[in-house]
Image: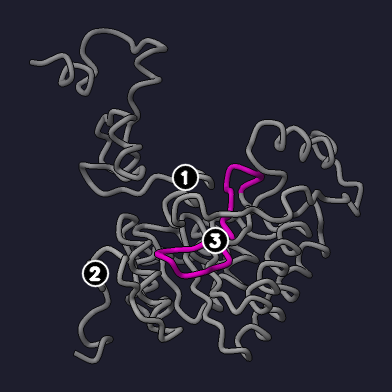
Amino acid sequence: MSWIDKIKAGIGGKKTARDEDLWVECKKCKEQIYIAELETNLRVCPHCDYHFRLATRQRIHQLMDQDTFKEYDQHLTSADPLKFKDTKKYKDRIKSLAKKGLSNDAVITGSGSMESLPIEICVFDFSFMGGSMGSVVGEKITRSIERAMENNSALVITSSSGGARMQEGIFSLMQMAKTSSALSKLSEMKIPYISILTDPTMGGVSASFSMLGDIILAEPGALIGFAGPRVIEQIIKQKLPEGFQTAEFLLEHGLIDNVVHRKNLRSTVAQLLRVLKSSPVPESSPEMEEPTLTKPPELLGA
């Protein structure tokens, strides 16, 4: 047995700190994955295609043309309107997370291009308070929508959120109406909006802007819904169907438009935007693969 197989099989004693830095276990198939290989594969398991969560900056790098992304509103921070305190003050929690991470709140917004198409993009950061939506998140998304209208640019939002931020109470819930209202104006101007749902997209985010896209895409296996499965089961006193609230379940029941593998996400979104904006493929653009549709044939009209 090779040393790699021994590590995968757990033979040879405890893992060292160095081993932990080099390997990670897939949550789905339980295979040991070399971290460098996982990163090269866009954090998708090479054995079973399980999609690990992708860091916000990695997501931007994956979707945007090189050196085109310009970030906006990165200095906005919450005013802590309720003076909320749990195990620590809300303001202190925000400050400590901002120091650890690469942003001041749970979404990064900006402008750039995707396969030469100008877009406004919002990417959620689940590592920042579970990607929860507070007043800063709502304001940044609304400003992105307004820039899309001003510049006649398409809008792309990649969601990964537990929902509304309890530390801001009603101020958080108001962001659902605020962002949805802004999107209605975007729709009136016939500017396309593509929503990408990643694991997880829940609560107030799923009940507002994330489900209002002209096209709604999701990554494989993403958990999508309002309340979580355990909460629903406790309320209705019934066992939920297998795969309930997964991207594939929602696709089967007509709630989203497609499930797209991460490696195909950029080309699929760009191709859809060209259709929605009736834009020709630029001559310098590399040949794109046809997006792999996972809808049942009967739903596609085949």
Q: Position of residue 63 (x, y in %)?
A: 44, 57
Q: Quadrant of residue 266?
A: bottom left
Q: Nearer the viewer, residue 245 or 111?
A: 111
Marks 1 and 3: which is nearer the front? 3
Residue 74 lies in the magenta stretch: no
Residue 230, compared with residue 14, is above or below; it is below
Image: magenta residue range = 112-130
Marks 2 and 3: which is nearer the front? 3
Q: Residue at x 35, y 49 (%)?
A: 51
| Residue tagged 3 | 112
Whether tag 1 and tag 2 are in contact, CB under 8 A, the answer is: no
Q: Position of residue 283 (x, y in %)?
A: 30, 71
| Residue tagged 2 | 292
Q: Give the CA separation, mark 2 to mark 3.
A: 25 Å
Q: Label 1 crowding class (10 Å Cα cut-off): few <14, some 14-19, many 20+?
A: few
Is tag 1's residue or tag 2's residue first in the polypeptide sequence? 1
Amino acid type, mark 2:
Thr
